[in-house]
Amino acid sequence: MRPLIEISDLTKSYGSLHAVRGVSFAVAEGEIFGMLGPNGAGKTTTVEIIEGLRDRDGGRVSVFGLDPAKAGSEVKGRTGVQLQQVALYPRLRVREVICLFASFYDRQANPDELISLLGLEERRNARVGELSGGQAQRLSVALAVVNVPELLFLDEPSTGMDPQARRNLWDVIRGFKADGMTIVLTTHYMEEAERLCDRVAVMDYGKIIALDTPRNLVHEHFEQDAIEFSSTMDWSISELRGLDFVSSATAQGSEYSLFSTNVPGTMGHLLKFSDAKGLSIDGMRVRHATLEDVFLKLTGRTLRD
């Protein structure tokens, strides 16, 4: 598949702050491409430059073979953008807002079909100001695709949704891909990226530090399973890392994770260690490594840091 987006040596600074430092990547036509990174990593600035919403300092950006800084109207006409926060007139009704946005474009989706697709049937006549956070997010997604875009940008699309609504939205996004849309997804939900994205780019301090499929990233950085346990007592991470068969150990509050090449062996040593030190273990479980483990290993931070 040919690249629909091509970025080469992209840079952007705000005074002495280098927000984007020589970023290069391509997004293939028809793929779902994820942008991951802690707050301040540069991903939002990068995406806004691609969308044509922000000027760049240097580098090359091509969308549909066009420079969005020079051919912004043409690029925007073929693009849909869902922002994390959208300011809409609160007294307008849901269907009115969708019809209003549709009137801006020559190519329009059917408003009633969008309302049904995004699960807003019972709220079609509700005022925007009466919507819950999750309903407002679904409306923002509907508005982003009202022009039937070839390229769709989604910024935290499932924020504020309950687990069932989130999974329903995932099915909708998969449907967009099946219809031929190319999607750039920014999310704080690692499971969302793992389930939806064909490839993900991990950004930190203005640079891309990893780019591959979620599966390949996990396999590259973790060949072992994780032992997780909780404890109300403070454990020494350096001592945990020194246990037999342990390749890495991390802690987040009272939650501890050990990656081991020999899970039964490590569990035995862990129990002996806890007895010798007088430390408590409140529940223990074993799981496979995930994209979140990769992220923590690469950045040392959670997505919300």
Image (cartoon, rainbow, N blue to C red):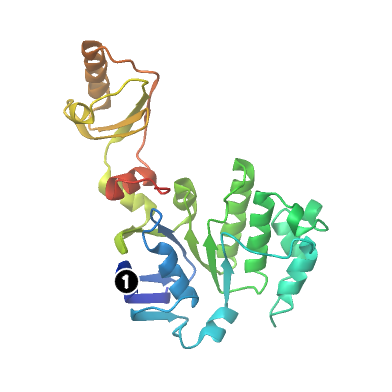
Q: Position of residue 133 (x, y in %)?
A: 65, 50
Q: Nearer the viewer, residue 83 or 283?
A: 83
* Residue at the far bottom in the pictured view: 70
Measured along the vertical axis of the image, is residue 267 above or below residue 225?
Answer: above
Q: Does residue 34 appear left or right of residue 162 in this picture? A: left
Disc 1 packing (10 Å; few <14; some 14–19; many ≥20): some
Q: Is residue 19 left or right of residue 249?
A: right
Instruction: State the residue at coordinates (27%, 24%).
Output: 235
Q: Could you tell me which residue is drawn at 36 percent across and 21 percent down?
A: 231
Is residue 2 in sight in this rendering?
no
Residue 115: percent from the left, percent from the top? 75, 60
Position of 153 relative to 304 (above/below): below
- Identify which residue, 6 or 52, lies in the foreground: 52
- Is residue 292 found left or right of 298 in the rendered image? right
Residue situated furthest right in the rendering: 125
Image quadrant in which the N terminus is located: bottom left
Q: Amino acid at mark 1?
A: Ser
What residue is drawn where x is 47% and y is 71%?
Answer: 48
Observer able to see residue 197: yes
Q: Where is residue 199, by image quadrant?
A: bottom left
**Residue carrying label 1:** 24
Q: In the structure shown, which secondary structural element does the residue marked by tag 1 occupy?
A: strand
Residue 128 image offset from top left, x and y in percent: 75, 58
Spot occupied by residue 301 in the image (x, y as percentages of width and height): 34, 46
Count of all numbered marks drawn on residues in the image: 1
